[in-house]
Image: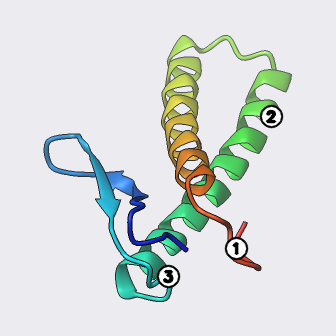
């Protein structure tokens, strides 16, 4: 939960690519719950992508396009995970939300 003088970094950016923040102490509000849901989805997708990357690399791929796509997807997932980590580092994690 954020205090009144803290802002929560949201898991999306605005139309201009700048970070979006939420100023509220109501962790149960609509935007807070939406952000929690999106963060959980992003972390789940990153976990699945990591497993896929392990499988691709274990096969010793020769297709450079496949490796390029994998690198792009991993970069995107890492960006999302770092945003979640930054956001959660700024606010206490409620029980059951990790």
Pointers 1 and 3 in contact (CB under 8 A)?
no
- Marked residue nearer the N-terminal end (2 or 3): 3
Q: Is residue 97 left or right of residue 29?
A: right
Q: Is residue 14 left or right of residue 73?
A: left
SS for tag 1?
Answer: loop
Q: Which residue is mark 1?
A: 97
SS for tag 2?
Answer: helix
Which is closer to the viewer, label 1 or label 3? 3
Query: Which of the image's four quarters has the N terminus?
Result: bottom right
The residues bearing labels 2 and 3 have C-alpha atoms spaced at a distance of 38 Å
- The residue at the point 60 percent across, 15 percent down is 63
Position above or below: 21 against 55: below
Q: Which residue is mark 2?
A: 55
- The residue at the point 47 percent across, 81 percent down is 33
Residue placed most toward the observer, 79 or 98? 98
**How busy is the neighbourhood of tag 1: few (under 14 within 10 Å), some, or many (20 plus)?**
few
Q: Is residue 19 left or right of residue 70?
A: left
Q: Farthest residue in the right direction?
A: 58
Position above or below: 15 against 82: below
- The residue at the point 72 percent across, 40 percent down is 50
Query: Which of the image's four quarters has the C terminus?
Result: bottom right
Which is closer to the viewer, label 2 or label 1? 1
Where residue 77 sits: x, y (%)? 55, 41
**How busy is the neighbourhood of tag 3: few (under 14 within 10 Å), some, or many (20 plus)?**
few
The residues bearing labels 1 and 3 have C-alpha atoms spaced at a distance of 11 Å
Q: Which residue is mark 3?
A: 27
The residues bearing labels 2 and 1 have C-alpha atoms spaced at a distance of 29 Å
Quadrant assignment, res 21: bottom left
Where residue 56 sits: x, y (%)? 74, 29
Pointers 2 and 3 in contact (CB under 8 A)?
no
């Amino acid at each position: 939960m954020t205090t009144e003088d803290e802002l929560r970094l949201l898991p999306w950016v605005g139309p201009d690519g700048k970070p979006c923040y939420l100023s509220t102490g109501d962790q149960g509000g609509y935007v807070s719950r939406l952000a929690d849901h999106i963060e959980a989805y992003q972390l789940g997708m990153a976990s699945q992508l990591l497993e896929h990357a392990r499988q691709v690399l274990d096969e010793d791929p020769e297709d450079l396009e496949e490796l390029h796509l994998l690198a792009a997807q991993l970069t995107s997932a890492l960006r999302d995970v770092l945003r979640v980590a930054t956001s959660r580092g700024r606010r206490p994690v409620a029980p059951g939300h990790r």
